[in-house]
Each structure stands twice: as C-alpha cells, then as structure tokens.
Amino acid sequence: MEALSDTDTRLLVDSADRFFADKHGAILRGDYSDMQGSGALWSECAAMGWLQICESVTDSEPGFGTLEAAALMEAIGAYLPPLPLAHGVAIATLLVDIRIPAHEARPLASWLQGQSSMGMVEDDTVLYAAAEQALRLSWADNILLVEQVTPSRVGYGVDPLIAVAAEAGEPRRVATLPCEQPMWRRYRARLRCLLLAEALGAAGAALNLAVQYAKEREQFGRPIGANQAIKHALADNRMALDDARLALHDACAAIDGSGEAMANRLAMAELLVQEATHAIAAQSIQAHGATGFTWECPVHFYFKRIKHIGARLRRNRDAVAILEQIWEAC
Amino acid sequence: MGLPEDPQKFRAYVRNWLERNYASFLESWDGPRDARNLDLRRAWEDRLCAHGWSGLGWPREFGGQALDLARQAIFHEEHALCGAPLGVNLVGHGILGPTLLHFGSAAQKQRFLTGILNNQVVWCQGYSEPASGSDLASLRSRARNVGNGWVLNGHKIWTSFADRADWCFVLARSNPDVAPHKGLSFFLVDMRQPGVRVAPIRQLTGEHEFCEVFFEDVSIDADCLVGEPGDGWRIAMAAASFERGTYFLPRLVRFRQELQAVRKDIEAAGRHVATATAHGWKMRWARLAVDSHVLRLKADQALAAARSGTPPGPEGSTTKLLWSEAHQRLLELSIEIRGDGLLRPRSGSGTDDFDLLQHTWLWTRAETILAGTSEIQRNIVAERMLGLPKGA
C-alpha cells in the first residue's frame, strides 16, 4: 500500500469535524443515546463511508489503512458519539480480509450499510445496548462465529451516554465463516487500536477544554495557566498524549505491514494510551476547579468515556499484565 | 573518502571501520582505558577527524563530506554502538561549524572551519552567566565597540571544556539600550590571550568538565563578530537547532545498551531477592523499555522532519524531557539492583564496572538541568504547544 499524504488524513479528520460539530451538543444531552437516536446517527455515520475506510488495506490499491482509520477514530472520539464505530471499522475490514462477500453475512452487511443498528457484546456485557439486538463475534478452530443476542436489563454504567446491558435468551447463530487465526488476531489488534484511538480523541478534547479554561480563568490578577503548577501538569498531559499517539500509529503500521513484533508494539501503545488518557481525565477536572465537578461543565463526559473505554481494555489485561508481556517479549 | 551511497552498505562500511579502528586505537592508547578520560576522548576525536569523519553534513567546498541526513544518522548511531566515547569538541563540530556555514562571512568560514574539521581548534560555548541561567536573554557580559573591534568584559559559567578550548563563541550584550534579546551579539573569542581566565568547577561527580570563564578587557577583532550587531539571539537560537536530527541518537543508543545491561542485572540479581522485589524491578524495566521505544519513534520523527525541512519546533524539548527523565529512572533502577554496592569502597581504577555505573548515575542529575532545565522545557511545551501564558 502506498503511503497517503498528511493532506488526505487531514481531509478525513476534517470530514469528521464537520459532521459532528453541530451534533455535539445533542450527543452530550443524550439525544443519540436511545434506540431511535443512536439508530439514526449510526445510519448517518455509515453513509459517510467511514466503516469501509480500511478495506483497501488488503488489496494492492492505494488507500487508507489502520493508521488513517485511527486518525479518523481519534477525531471522532473527541465528540463522544455513543456508537460502536471502532467495531464497525474492524468488522468491515475483517470481512474483506477473509474474503466474505457481504451477502453471505447479511445481518452484518445491513448493519455495516447503516440499515440496522446493533449493540456489541464484549465478554459478557452488551455495549451500545440501546439497539434492539447485539452482535457477538467469537473465534475457534479457524471458524468465525457471528451470533445475535437480545440485551436485557438495559441501563448505564459509568458513561451516561452509552447504554449497557446483560445478555438475555439463547444467542442466535447468524453466520459461521472460515477465518484463519492471523486474520482473527489482526481483527482483534485493529479493534484495540481503534478503541485506543477513540480514547485518545476523548482525552485530547478534555485537554483542550482544560487548556482553554486555564487561559481564560483569572485568579490573583492573571490566568491560572500562567502558574507552573498548572501549565506543567498540562504540558505533561500533552506530551503523554503525543507519545501515546506516536506509539499507537506505530502499532497501526505493524498491523498493516509485516506484523513484526505486532503484539509488543500494540502492548506498548496500549500502556501509553491508558496512562495518558487517565492522567488527562483527572487533570482536566482538576484544572477546572469546582466548576469541573459540576454536571454542567462537559469535562465529566470525557472523564467518564475514558474510564468506560479504559475498563473495557483492562478486562483483557491491566497495566501489570502489559508490562509483564513487554518484559517477556523484549 | 569514497563512501557508499546505499544506506545499508554505508552502515556495514562504517561499522567495520569503527570496529577495527576503535580497537586499534585502544590498543595503542598509553593512558587508562577509561572512556570518561578527556585525553582519551580528545585523541579518539582527533583520530576520527584525521580519517575524514567530521563535517559529515557540510558541503564539499568547505571540506565536508556532504552526506545526506540518513547517512549522518547512521554514522552517529554506529559510533555509539561501537562503544567509543563522544569527543571534547562537540560544540565545535555540532554547533559552531554549522552556524558559521549559515551565518559566517566568507573570511570566517575560511579561517575557522578547517580547524574544526581537523580538530586542531577546540571550541567552547560562552552563553550562561552566574545571574543568567534559564533567563539567558538577561545576560550581562558587555561588548563595547571600539572602532576597529570590540572589547569584552564579563563572566561566563557552566562552560564545558573551557580549560581545553582554544576558542569560545560568546553571546554578549553589544547594545544595552534595547530590549534584552535584541541587544546581544555573537562573537568568536580567542581563549589564548591576556584577560581570559578559566577556573574549572568541580562537579558532584568529582571531576572538572565545567568551568567559569572571566573576560577582562578582552579584545575581539571586528571580523570576529558573526552576523550583524544585535543578531546574537537569533543566531544562538538557530545554532541550537542544527543538531536536532542527530543530537539524541548517541544518547538513544546508549540508553538501549544500558537497558539491556540492566536486564541482565535483574535476571542475575533477581534470584537472590524476594519475588515481589524482582517483580517490581521487572515492571520498572518494562516501563523503561516503553520509554526507549518512544525515544526511537521520536528520533525517527525528528529525522524525518529535519529531512523534509520542517522548521524546528518545541519537539526538541519533549525529547529532551523524556530522555533525561527516563535516563534518571533507568540509572536509579540500575543502582538499586546492585544492593549495598554504594556502601563499598570505590576502586578508583577508572575501569571498574561499578565505579563507571556510579559515575553515569551521578551524571544523570545534570541531564535534567543542562541545556535547558526540565522546568524550562515544560514552560516551552506549555507556551508553544498549548498556547498557555508566560509566567508573571
């Protein structure tokens, strides 16, 4: 695959900014968090063509890859949409990877085209559970199993915008598709990268809010951001964010490239994203002072999204498990 | 030198040359084989220069090798990998040479570049003063125009290798009546003349690398002013950016080598300590491996930016912060693993493994201070990358 210019990535990111700019207020009000709202927003996002962004990774055509998808996902993450977009991109790419024509996996195809909206099962939890149905993907013995489940006891976890639920009833088999292990592993790695990118986007937006506030809020006759106690903490946040992005893009390149040391590069990116985003989650509230503790100040939505994604990632492995992996691999 | 164009071949050539020559250099070296020894460092630097390994990126017309940035990077990386120490004329090669190429007059290039290339003239950098450390633009050394030249009075400090330097490039105030950074000029000062006094400063490591330099009515020829009067700040800022693609490469290689050594120490010492202690070391080591990975990615990014001609930004500050602070953590870990080693008498032989480690460990305390303290670097990041206001 040919490398794309920064300009192409910029255009992609701009498209996300334009799309979400006038929807952001409604997202934070929860207008897109119920069945109808999230379904409508899902259709619109699908119409943008974002879910198919990585499809050309697998053929020789120049096009976007996981790196550009991560840049897009980061841009989208800044607006906190309550949608399984990371899953959408990863699953659409997996289908191309394993060369399954869309009609052989019809419920997936209609979901990816935005005709239906679906929650996603991760471990034993249904996420984005405002939808009537949720998808579960699992893999064993070179077979990808796609099932549909019905969410029950729908409610909200830490993130007030993303509905979560338990599974109810027997899962219904939707498709069994041949899928070799490297494809499945690439799918898992790509999904993880996109989730990390989404968390980075939320953290970047939270940091922007904190920086803006530190420039405007005056105490003792000067902006609070002139004080080193605040500006250095925010500088550390910014550097941690940039380093995490650098490592994340390196992991994306590993996924689309030779796959060399992919697991280790992804582990490093994951550690850095977790560290950076949680530090920013805390600091962005702290920099706002008492205002940061109010519901009215939007910074808590970012805090909660970061904690929501962080908890999902940690289910798989926490920081110690990642460090142990790195110790073993290096 | 007919150097290979192809990066892979160039790397193989450099590696082979360095391995052979550094080994034979050490064999012929009479003094202690201590890579900290300044005479050894100077002699090795002389050897490199004698074989044309200087002015790697300079144009051919000035005696340089006109190597592209990729090959310059390979040389610096391989040089660090072979275990050879950095020289003592670092600011001559890395800062003043490129500065003269950019800002120097034809006569200045003619007069000074050869001495740097063949390492016959060692340079030091006269910027910091007792009252002007982080706030460099407030410096007070005064250069008075006396018609056919200048007369310099002032007091510089933290000047590395000033006791060995033949010449010094000095920032001094040539006009006290304008804004602080507009009144500075960039001078080339002969250190071997009356009125120049050098007083070495003993560092907490025990040796003297830094000095104080006193200038008392020192004369400077008119043609030893670089650029125009008042250009000093602009030139000094640009001078600091010339090394940005390659400056951290030797440090990065060293970091990786030290990281591997620490791993071996953990594996060996980990068997004799509590499981939880060994696990703690491993976790800290793994986190440092992540820092090493990021440093590598940042170096690649800096090299790419330098190659594409992107103007330098505050990324140098972010790399410096990450490298210097991670290096401190690495050496702290390294010392901790050695248990009560700090309580044993030092051998003082100059080649003792643990003595060297202690020296490196103590040196890391300087790394978050020199060339812009961590506090200043964070100010730069906050102000230039985040747009936060300057302090009151």
Image (spheres, coloured by chain):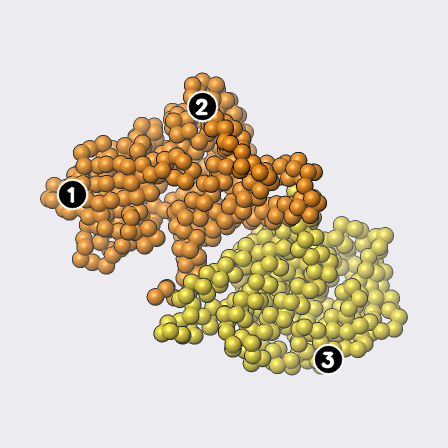
Chain colours: A yellow, B orange
Q: Quadrant of residue B155?
A: top left
Q: Residue A35 shows which numbered tag? A: 3
Question: Numbered disc 1: what chain?
Answer: B
Where does the N terminus of chain B fall, quadrant-wise?
A: top left
Residue B170, horizontal then vertical, whole percent? 26, 43
| Relative horizontal placement of residue B144, taking residue B376 as reference (left or right) | left
Residue B341, horizontal then vertical, whole percent? 56, 36
User: Which residue does the numbered mark 1 point to in the structure image?
Assistant: B150
Q: Residue type at mark 2: give it.
A: Pro
User: Which residue does the numbered mark 2 point to in the structure image?
Assistant: B32
Up-down relation of residue A175 to residue A290 (above or below) = above
Up-down relation of residue A235 to residue B363 (above or below) = below
The secondary element bearing badge 3 is classed as helix
Q: Residue at x 34, y 28 (%)?
A: B118
Up-down relation of residue B182 to residue A51 (above or below) = above
Where does the C terminus of chain B fall, quadrant-wise?
A: bottom left
The secondary element bearing badge 1 is classed as strand
